[in-house]
Image (spheres, helix red, strand yellow):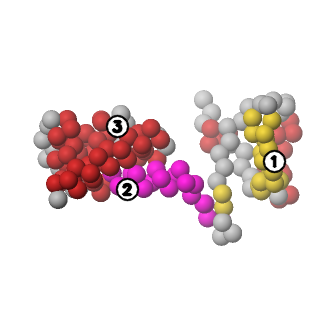
Amino acid sequence: MTEIKDAAIHFEAKKISLKQSKDGTIITLVIHPADTGSVSELWETWTGQRYMVAMVGLTDEERPIATKTSEAGSRAVQSAGILCRDPDFQEYIGQQIDTFIPDDESCARELCSILGIASRTEMKENEEARESFLALRDRFNRSRDEKN
């Protein structure tokens, strides 16, 4: 089976318009003349051909621009990593599942189980798990504040 990455057409483009139709959002891109060779296959496919599209904004220095969603996901993963090393959070998670949590690795496993994910890094893409974690973190912070 062909991998998506191997079958992808790569080119740089600029967004010049964005509008709506009854079928969805229409994005108009301008492709630099140096990249037109890489998109020649687009001329050979029929109108209506489906494509999977991934777009990354670029700075003038050719560096990717993070989206708000990717930044939120990265912050949640980082926060979960920090909290899982916190003995108070380990105790809090242990209370939630009525089990003693001896270390950060056990805490990470139990947190993932609570959130229904295999790895904390899934929070980068899984908005539902990320929101559940943020709510759990808020409850933990409130309970910590009440103790102090």
Mark 1 Cα-neighbour bin, 10 Å: few <14, some 14–19, many ≥20: few
Q: Position of residue 113 (x, y in %)?
A: 30, 35
Mark 2 Cα-neighbour bin, 10 Å: few <14, some 14–19, many ≥20: few
Q: Which residue is mark 3?
A: 115
Quarter placement of the N terminus: top right
Q: In the drawing, does residue 56 fall left or right of residue 29?
A: left
Query: Against 40, is 31 above or below?
Result: below
Q: Is residue 24 magenta?
A: no
Quarter placement of the C terminus: bottom left
Query: Against 4, is 71 above or below?
Result: below
Q: Position of residue 109 (x, y in %)?
A: 27, 41
Q: Which residue is mark 1?
A: 28
Q: Does the CB distance between marks 2 and 3 fall below 8 Å?
A: no
Q: For marks 1 and 3, give the CA distance.
A: 39 Å
Q: Which three-letter amino acid code belongs to the residue tagged 3?
A: Leu
Q: Which residues are magenta?
A: 62-80
Q: Which residue is mark 2?
A: 78
Q: Which three-letter amino acid code belongs to the residue tagged 2?
A: Gln
